[in-house]
Image: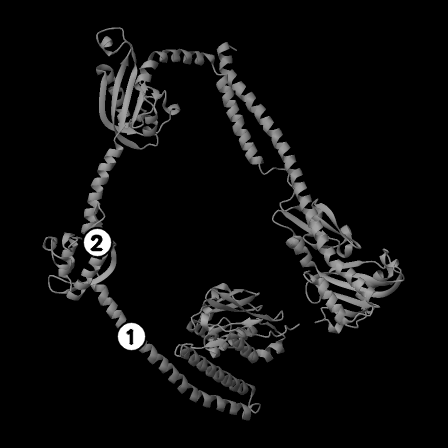
Amino acid sequence: MTRTRWESLLPALAAALVVLLVLGGVFLIDAAEGRRYAEQTTATVTERAAAIRARVEQALNTRLFLVRSLVALVRSNPELTQAEFEEAAAAAAEGIDGVRSLALARNAVATHFYPLAGNEQAIGHDLLADPNRRGAIMEVLGKRRFLIQGPVPLLQGGVAVVGRLPVVLPDSPTAAIQATPRGKVWGLAVIIIDVETILREAGAAGAGDETVEFAIRGRDGLGASGEVFLGRSELFEESPVLTDIILPNGTWQLGALPRDGWSSRSPYAASLRLVGGLLAAACGFAAWRLVRDPIKLRREVAAARETVLVSECRQSMLVDSVEDYAIYMLGPDGTVASWSNGARRIVGYGAEEVVGRPYGLFFLPDAVQAGVPEVELAVAREKGRHSTERWHLRRNGSRFPCVTTIASIWEGGRNEARDGGEGRLLGFSVVTHDLTQRIEIENNLRESNRRFQDIVGMAGEFIWEIDIAGRYTFVSDRVQDVLGHSPAELLRCAMVDTMAPEDGARMTAVLRNHAAAARPFRHEEFRCIGKDGRTVWLWGSGIPILQADGHVAGFRGVAQDITDQKIIENRLRRTVEKLERSNVELARFAEVAAHDLQEPLRIMVSYANLLVRRYAGRLDKDADDFLGFIVESSVRMKCLIQDLLRYSLIERSDPPASLADTGACLREAMDGVKELVHAIGAAVELPDRAPLVPGDAREITEVFRNLLANAIEYRASDRDLRIAVGVKPAGSAWEFSVSDNGIGIEARYFDRIFEVFERLHTQRVHPGTGIGLAICRKIVQRHGGTMAVSSVPGSGSVFSFTLPAAAADDHAPRAELVAEPAAS
């Protein structure tokens, strides 16, 4: 291989070697980072699991300590009463959430409960008679130790841990402090703790957080061999971090692992590899540059020596502080040799981008093809100086107008070269002046003048100026279309002379007052008399014209013809009056029509009922069905007419003038559905207090009655109905809500259910007229409030409405409500 060939391959080989070395280093760093990330993840999960374990143990032991306090209570007073037990248990459990109940069982027979409400029937129950509990009870009494069972589901709902501790009356004071005290077994102390409260307090509810997933196993304290009762059971097969939660009679095992699983790949691996690849490329390129052919370096050194000859001349001509001009040097071959700050600002290139590139870089493509750069350099070389005005190109591709002056630089001076001396061309100096700003200012001025003339000529309003005496000094051509006067006819005429006398006097006062205060006037309406004698309504605004000393010299403003608008306003007012009269007549017609319809309907229902009583069972089955249909349809028609009449009369009732006790309204509404509530076993929760609001008590009662009836009608068949009535302040109003756990409503029907006759179910499934909610919303709107619904299908609905609060001087103490006990 020849030396030349070897020298040409050497830079590439050096670059390849450097790239391989850098990539190898990046691979090692990536592997180390992966191991570090895996160790960090394990440490984080372990720390989270330890924190959860500690909080679970703390939350559980805090509640289990209550059982020991009960044991101490019994030892101090073996014959304590239920009242004494409730008082002590309430004091001990105060401020501690999650305690479902505390109990004592003397001789394994339930004798004391806290809370007693709901547990009265359990008093006297023999725990040993229950085969499901007998084994655990015997173990507690036999081994005389604390026993925790669960988590187990409760009949009342929820999952709980049951803790049982034997109550032993020690034979002596020293026996009481022994781990297994000797003495007579008095019975058991029992605590039932809600598991969800414990896990939520420990931060383990929901089986983890966004980054770590948890699972717990070991039901009944069996540790790793027990059942999983929180989280996925599969988690324990995925190499989790394990830790034991210590219980008095065993352990629970807590497992934790990242939600995305264990990973040895760092989240920064992709970035590290990308940076490593770029670094390898950069290092390879640097190695290639460093090992390139040395001959090229020697040539560059020789070229640099030649540039020393022109350095002094260049330094004297280029002033980097000049930024309004692009000043730079060209070499003898027409390439850029130096670059100034002004050139960078105007053209956009940095020195590193442009030095060494041809002079034609700044010319338009057409000029480059025509050889304009070479011609200009030739002229400058021949004549010593050349100046021209043309377009240049910026770095971003935009073009700008400029004046460019090129001067040639000769060794020994221009005169010596021209006289036939041996002077050598050293290069060219170029000075370029950007004309963009000047041309832009000129164009903007012309455009501003043109725009002003166009706006004045095309605006729908006419523009005017007056002096301090109120005489027109300028009026746009549009005034002739509005008033019929030409601008020339109005110049030097007083503005108020064209107005109606009463409006002229008012506007004279407006101009005088605003001139004194040097402030604009806006939206003034006045009438002018046109040239043809017709009255023209104008809508005008003006701003003061201020002199240099701050005095008002006049006003400048616009006036718009609003005659057609005034005509439309008059027509609209007459139309509104006509509609109001029509609404009154329509309401009166609805009332009369409903009354007249009820009379024949009443006869129809009476005779239909008479037919049913006399002939039911005497005709065939079809006849009985037909009679039933007649009675049912007649009754439904009667209800429809009554609801329609009620709906039409809401707007006609007088506005509320007194305060309504919403508590009394709610009690009256509950009285109407109380029997049905008890019959279906529903639970109704009422607020402790309710406000006094300005309104009609009868209508507010009707709103509550309809909403309660709806909640009962649309209850779910698979669960007991629960209704909650709430009230809270909402700004200057009160917000009432009626929520239930019924069948719910889809969101697309939220607006539809408040319309008249809009029903989502058939008459046979859910009977009704379909007007109840429309009446409710109409009543609420008449009282100045709003009504809305929110619902989750299958989970229940919340109907809410607002009523304005009473004025400050009308406030009275809120009425108190006695909430009915929830049905068990």
At horizontal 38% and vertical 12% (from top left) the residue drawn is 303
At horizontal 71% and vertical 62% (from top left) the residue drawn is 93
Task: Give x and y (percent) for residue 810.
Answer: 46, 73
Left or right of 18 on screen, residue 161? right
Name of the residue lying farthest toward the bottom: 614
Q: Which amino acid does label 1 sit on?
A: Glu
Judge the density around disc 2: few (<14), some (14-19), many (≥20) Cα neighbours within 10 Å: many
438 lies above or below 585: above
Name of the residue lying farthest toward the left: 489
* Residue occupied by mark 1: 577
Task: Give x and y (percent) for residue 729.
Answer: 50, 66
Task: Give x and y (percent) for residue 605.
Answer: 48, 88
Judge whether residue 765 can be spotted in this image: no
Which of label 1 and label 2 is nearer to you? Answer: 2
Left or right of 730 on screen, residue 314? left
Q: Quadrant of residue 186?
A: bottom right
Q: In which quarter of the image is residue 180?
A: bottom right
Mark 1–mark 2 distance (CA, rounded to whole Å): 37 Å
At horizontal 70% and vertical 45% (from top left) the residue drawn is 240
Q: In the picture, which quadrant includes the C terminus? A: bottom right
Relative depth, front residue between 237 and 31: 31
Relative depth, front residue between 159 and 311: 311
Q: What residue type is labelled 2?
A: Gly
* Residue occupied by mark 2: 557
Q: What element carries label 2?
A: strand
Task: Give x and y (percent) for residue 565.
Answer: 23, 64
